[in-house]
Every structure is written in structure tokens, then in C-alpha cells.
Amino acid sequence: MNLLSPSVKLGILGGGQLGKMLLQKAADFNITSFVLDPDEDAPCKHLCTKFFHGSFNDYNAVMAFGSECDIITIEIEHVNTDALFELEKLGKKIFPQPNIIKMVQDKGLQKQFYAQLQLPTSPFYLIEKAREIRTGKFPLIQKTRKAGYDGKGVKRITDANDLKNAFDEPSVIEDCVEIEKEISVIVARNEKGEIKSFPVVEMEFNAEANLVEFLFSPSSCNNLIAEEAQQVAEKLIEQLQMVGLLAVEMFIDKNGKVLINEIAPRPHNSGHHTIEGNITSQYEQHLRAIFNLPLGNTSCIDCAGMVNLLGEKDFMGTAVYKGIEDVMKIPGAYIHLYGKKTTKPFRKMGHVTVTGKNIEEVKNKAEKVKRIIKVVA
């Protein structure tokens, strides 16, 4: 089968901004694309060959959608894996594979997998109810095992008084890491077993929203730490035998130790800059991987940064982007709006990539973009 034939249909579960950017690259390869999303006005709606309105959590909706596709991928993990297992039995190619999606949906299973492979991660234990949280050591981080996303489902428990606010549901309890840097490595693997990772990137978070606010590539961490982080990501995708793109978010602690935080088996916020900043973007690499094509060169073209455009704190309603024209005057600034009609506090509404000859130049541009653009209603 010629995988890039227009007769081969790619199905994407999820029609948000990640799917939109994936479709923009798929158009270059003349790929026939189907999208399933519960939002009738999803960002992907007018870019795909055929749009299906329905829930990617619904077994019947995913089965009906998948029956029309040859290759199925995701732009969000929270999909119906029972349907994906059944579609796989029917001969559909599902990438990432359903067993990996199911594991990633459960942060407890993720942590157990790292421990089993002796991959570096912070010490942890699992609980079913809040009363099982051990009080001998604070601070702690509690993460609900399922449904957490974009900083939701995470609590810092500073002392015994905070226990009354803990989630009373199955959770991972982690030691609180003294973090020096938060980094990410995006790695890809195709069916032939070829593996390539992107250079390490460094992330800065919005403390209030617990979302990435800035990203810089390459990271300022030293070469030995960068090599170790890439090796960890490559070992992880190889041990998973995963096909597709895997984002591995990591901490560097105060002692220079690299620790896996979480993974996402799909294109990721920490790879948006690759569209302008790298020879191959994360979206092209994901398509190359799932279509079993040679993986692309991941080298940086320039130093790059990314500014997430989040909805302003006090605004909700039809989105208005203030400052766009002024940002367009900045050399090496690239605006990506996600096509979401309404904004709300801290909603991801778009991003701006900035490029430059060095990280200092990139950081100055990123700070300028952050000051200028405001997403209001």
C-alpha cells in the first residue's frame, strides 16, 4: 500500500490546535484527512477533508469514525481506548498504539513503567483515597491518576493543614523536587524502529495557571545533561515500541539530576517552535513516523522561543487579539492563532514563535511579544 496515496485516509481524534497544525503539514503531503471532535466549530473543521461531529470518548462514535480511516492518530490522550483496541483488531493502524494511550491516561501506570525500566523519576507512591497520604514528609505533590490536563488535577501539599484540600480519589503522591529547570525532549519512532529526538528545550511556567508561558530552544543546560535527557527520551520510546511522536517533560533538580515528569504521545506544546526553528517540524515528524517514512533532520535552524497566548485573567467571551499588528513588525516573529472563537482566563488561544541568532536576542523578543499581545473579549 502506498501510504501517501490520496486513497489512504488519516483519521485524527481531536480537532484542536494540535490537529490544526498537523493538518497544515498533512496538506503538503496531499494526505486525505478525517477529524472527529465534539466541538462543531473546532479549529480543524475547515482544514480536513471530512469533519465528524462527535465525542472521541464515545465508543460508538470512535468505531464509526475509525471504520472510514486507514491510519488513526490522536491530538489528545483522553479518547476511548476500547474502541481503538477493537479497530486495531480489524486491521486499522493506530499510532500511538492503544496500549500506550491507555497507559498514558493513568499517571500511576506511567510512574510504575518508569520504575520498572529504572528510568529516572521522582520517588512516588499510589493512593486510592486522601486518608492514605503519608504525613512523614512534606511538601508533596498530588496528581490525580486520570483526567488531569494542562495543570489540572495537580496539588501541592505543603503541610498537614493542606490535607483537607487534597483530592479524595486515586492519585500519585510524589516527593517535591527542588527544580533548577523544566525541560522537554520530543522524540519520534517509525515502524522500522528508526528513532530521532529534537534538541532539548527549556520551559518557563505561568505560576498562577501552571501552564507553559515561555519556551526556549536550545536549552541552556550543559551538553552532558542535554545528552542524558535525549538518551532518556530515546530509551523510553524504544522500550514502549511506540510509533509516532512522544513528548517527554523532565525536571533538572538542584543537583543536576534529570527526572521524568510526564509524557504525551502526540505533538506537544513544547514543540510548537519547531515549525520555524527546526529543519523538520514536530508535525512533519509525526506524519513521517506514523506513515513509516524516513524521519527528518531535527537540527535547529536558529535559536527559537515560543510565547503561549493565554486568555487574559479577567476576560471571557468572543476573542479579541490586541497588539497583533505591532508584533508583526518584529523581525523573526511568527503568529499562530488557533481559531477558537471564545476566550476565557488562561485558555490557550495561540502562540508566537520568535527566532534569533542567540538565546538573549530570542528572550528579548519573547518578552516584548508578551508585553504587547493581549487576548481579551
Image (cartoon, rainbow, N blue to C red):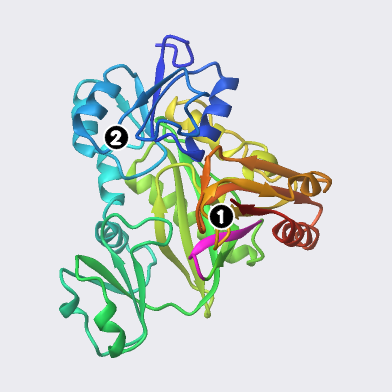
Discs 1, 2 touching: Cβ within 8 Å: no
Q: Which mark is residue 55?
A: 2
Boundaries of the magenta span: 208-216
Residue 187 relative to residue 308: left or right: left
Residue drawn at point x = 40 percent, y = 17 percent: 9
Which secondary structure dominates the residues rendered in magenta? strand
Q: Amino acid at mark 2?
A: Ser
Residue 368 relative to residue 267: left or right: right
Q: Is residue 55 positioned above or below 257 on the image?
A: above
In the picture, the quarter occupied by the N terminus is top left
Q: Secondary structure at mark 2?
A: loop
> Label 2 crowding class (10 Å Cα cut-off): few <14, some 14-19, many 20+?
some
Residue drawn at point x = 21 percent, y = 80 percent: 133
Quadrant in the rendering for residue 54: top left
Q: Secondary structure at mark 1?
A: loop
Residue assigned mark 1: 311
> Label 1 crowding class (10 Å Cα cut-off): few <14, some 14-19, many 20+?
many
